Image: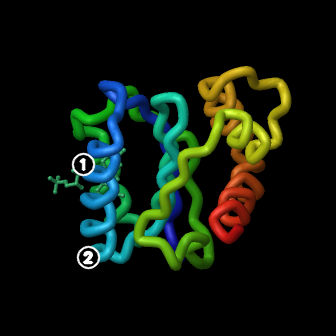
Amino acid sequence: MTYQIVYSSRSTQPVAAKKLEEILADARVGNKKNNVTGALIFVDDVFLQILEGEEPVIRQLMNSISNDSRHEAVKVIYEAQVDAPAFGSWSMAYIAPSSEEVKAWSGFEGADNINAVVDHIHQHPHNVPEFLVNILDTLAS
Ligand SMILES: Cc1cc2nc3c(=O)[nH]c(=O)nc-3n(C[C@H](O)[C@H](O)[C@H](O)COP(=O)(O)O)c2cc1C
């Protein structure tokens, strides 16, 4: 089984390209070591990250990530046990979509900003697998 978690957070400062590169480099090095895969989405100063791996590894990583001063308001919005990782080919995929795109992925037409999309995802966990499939489709295109 693979443990999957999705959280949202807000960057503490407007994130410059260099900062993002550092975060991604940290993530990819750590994840290769720990057999973790996933995707990092950055939109309007909000991070949405999908992490997958062994449950104890992911729990410990979530703990480290929560204490990272490069972002704040870390909120877990979805957790599941799945048969296999969805993002198995990515130590950490990166996408910087528009908030419109994220809204379309979530299937939530009523949202007018990224926070509303995040709240919607949190409140409708049964939609998350479809949300993840839409992200995978974007990565594949
Ligand atoms: C938005 C964000 C996403 C991150 N994603 C990961 C990740 O996927 N894997 C990882 O090992 N570190 C990630 N990090 C870095 C961790 O917060 C932390 O710096 C790293 O795991 C080293 O932690 P340690 O000093 O407790 O060992 C991320 C940091 C931020 C700000």
User: x, y (%) of residue 136?
Assistant: 67, 65
Residue 54's quadrant in the figure?
A: bottom left
Q: x, y (%) of residue 29?
A: 26, 69
In depth, the one of 71 and 140 nearer the eye is 140
Identity of the residue furthest to the front in this view? 17
Colour setting: rainbow
Q: Amino acid at mark 2?
A: Lys
Q: Tell me the element at label 1.
A: helix
Residue placed at 52% from the left, 47% from the top?
A: 41
109 is higher (above) or lower (below) than 3: above
Mark 2 vs ligand 1: CB below 8 Å: yes
Q: Is mark 1 within 8 Å of ligand 1?
A: yes
Q: Which mark is residue 33?
A: 2
Residue 62 left/right relative to 6: left
- Tell me how far mark 1 sits from mark 2, CA to CA: 15 Å
For mark 2, give the secondary structure. helix
Number of marks in the rendered image: 2
**Which quadrant of the figure has residue 16?**
top left
For disc 2, the neighbor class at 10 Å (few under 14, some 14 to 19, many from 20) is: few
- Residue 129 lies left or right of residue 91; in this view the side is right
Q: Position of residue 98 (x, y in %)?
A: 64, 38
Return the residue at label 1. Answer: 64
